Image: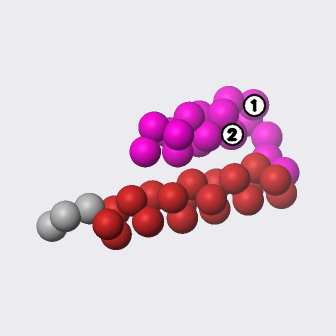
Amino acid sequence: MTISVLIVGFVAMDEESNWIEGVMLVGVYLMLAIVFFFLPA
C-alpha cells in the first residue's frame, strides 16, 4: 500500500505524463486491487 502511494506521488510530482508513467499507474491499480481482494472481510 505504501509503495503504491509513493509511485503515484512520484508520477504526479512533475505534472507531465508519458506512456511509462501510465504503465506505472496501471501497475499501482493492479497492486491495490490484489491487496483489497485478499483483505479479510
Which numbered disc covers residue 25?
none
Where is residue 23, by image quadrant?
Answer: bottom right
Label 2, residues with CA under 10 Å away: few <14, some 14-19, many ≥20: some
Q: Nearer the viewer, residue 33 or 12?
A: 33
* Amino acid residing under circle 2: Val
The residue range painted magenta reads 1-18
Residue 2, horizontal then vertical, whole percent: 45, 37
Find disc 2 in the rendering and name its residue.
Answer: 11
The local secondary structure at tag 1 comes to: loop
* Amino acid residing under circle 1: Asp
Find disc 1 in the rendering and name its residue.
Answer: 14
Which residue is depicted at the point 82% across and 53% down?
20
Which residue is depicted at the point 68% across and 39% down?
11
Q: CA gap, disc 2 to disc 1? A: 7 Å
Q: Nearer the viewer, residue 19 or 31?
A: 31
Query: Taking 11 as reference, is 2 left or right?
Result: left
Q: Quadrant of the N terminus?
A: top left
Q: Nearer the viewer, residue 29 or 17?
A: 29
